[in-house]
Image (cartoon, grey):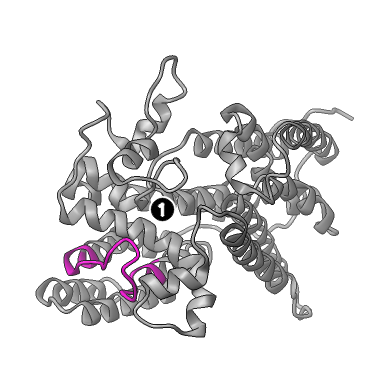
Amino acid sequence: MKYIFPILLSLICFLIDNYVAIYCLFFILTAFTCYNCNKLERPFVFFITFYLVIALLNISTWRGYTDVYTLKLYFFAFLCLCTPLMLNFKVKKDYRVRLGRDKNFVLFGILLHLSIVYLCVFYIYGTKGPVILNQSLRFDVPTAIEYIIKSALPIAALVPLVKAKKHFVLVSIIVLPAILMGYRGTSVLALISYLVTLWYINGCKEKLSDVKRKKNYTYYFLGLICFLIVFTGFYLRRTGNSELATVDVLIDIYFDYNSPFLYLIIPFYLGFKETVGLSNQIISESITNTINDYPLFFADLFTILPGERLAAGQTLGQIFGSVEGGGLTPGLLGGLYIDYGLYTFLFLIGMGVLFKLIIVKAYKNLLFIPVYTLFLTQYIHLFHRGFLKPEYLTSLVIIVFYFSMLNKIKIYKK
């Protein structure tokens, strides 16, 4: 039944052309998929649902209204990406909660890593000024220093495996540099990676214990922190930058109506709708990549090679224009569709299957959970951005390196 119902919804979606009706079908599909996924699959499905349910609201002219055909493609994109997560494999799950090996050595490595990161933050603040108060300054940060500062964020997922309790201070120290540099999205994703790791490990503890544990409010607290980082960062940027329109002006100009609800969702809506709007233009106007000789999805990987090369976002920036002179991001569907057309859905199926295999590995080995959470957060960022960044690969290399030390390599012999 759980495979037949999505097929039935897909047939109905294919036959009708009413935006509201298709949107309702999409909402039913996402709710059905969330219900039929297992524990580690649900966070990703929940995020995609939250993202698209907001982004596909046709309530404004911000980046234009979304066409019915584009909505249908998002329906099938969700189906291709998330249906593999409903597959069931017979897996012997590892519920044995333990800290990683040589955790003191790993903690020393983490502190050394963080020292380098904070030196880079102090250097930027000393030469550029307080970036958090004028976030347009972050576009002038050298790429190497940006990557060094962001390299601390994957460590957040490891915290529950190197410290049994009192995580707050270490997690704060890990995330603070990125917040100070105005990297709100990646900071939130780092907190999510820690939260998901903690959530799963605590769930394993409950399965092994006959004693009912007290309700843990950590998830609610960190969820509120994630919301506040995005919410306050958005309003600070809109009020502190004269080049950007205020929220009141945006609602008056672009939205079909004014409502208190809009002030609550607009920090998410503008960013989410930006990607959907760009994807809609790519799809409806049959825009293709005529600037780079290689697919835009992989273009950022070529920028680390010698010579001058346009990044993927810069290429789109030249096509669509950019307020602050930076690049634009069309989301995963648009980022693939601009080069691959309908073959995009094969990529999405492959990504869904790969993520499912990572999840199976995490079920088998509890210490692999941080690697899973990094895949989760990088997939989330990739879904929003649409182009593969070297940062995604370096983050995975960092987390796999720490996982290897915690799981396999015995550094000290007693």
Left of 386 or right of it: where is 393? right
Left of 93 or right of it: where is 127? right
Magenta span includes 55: yes
Instruction: Provide the residue span drawn in magenta.
Output: 52-72
Which of these two is toward me, 166 or 91?
166
Left of 298 or right of it: where is 163? right
Residue visible at 23% across and 55% down in the picture = 281
Residue visible at 42% across and 62% down in the picture = 272
Q: Secondary structure at mark 1?
A: helix
Few, some or many C-alpha atoms within 10 Å of disc 1 (few <14, some 14-19, many ≥20)?
many
Q: How many marks?
A: 1
Furthest-front residue in view? 242
Q: Quadrant of the C terminus?
A: top right
Q: Position of residue 159 (x, y in %)?
A: 75, 50
Eyeballing the image, is 200 above or below 15? above
Q: Is residue 53 visible?
A: no
Q: Position of residue 38 (x, y in %)?
A: 48, 68
Magenta span includes 159: no
Which of these two is toward me, 407 or 13?
13
- Mark 1 highlights which residue? 383
Residue visible at 47% across and 78% down in the picture = 262
Q: Position of residue 230 (x, y in %)?
A: 60, 62
Quadrant position of residue 89: bottom left
Quadrant position of residue 52: bottom left
Eyeballing the image, is 16 above or below 185? below
Residue visible at 9% across and 75% down in the picture = 15
Q: Is residue 18 visible?
A: yes
Q: Amino acid at mark 1?
A: Phe
Eyeballing the image, is 163 above or below 3? above
Furthest-top residue in view? 306
Which of these two is toward me, 206 or 312?
312
Q: Quadrant of the N terminus?
A: bottom left
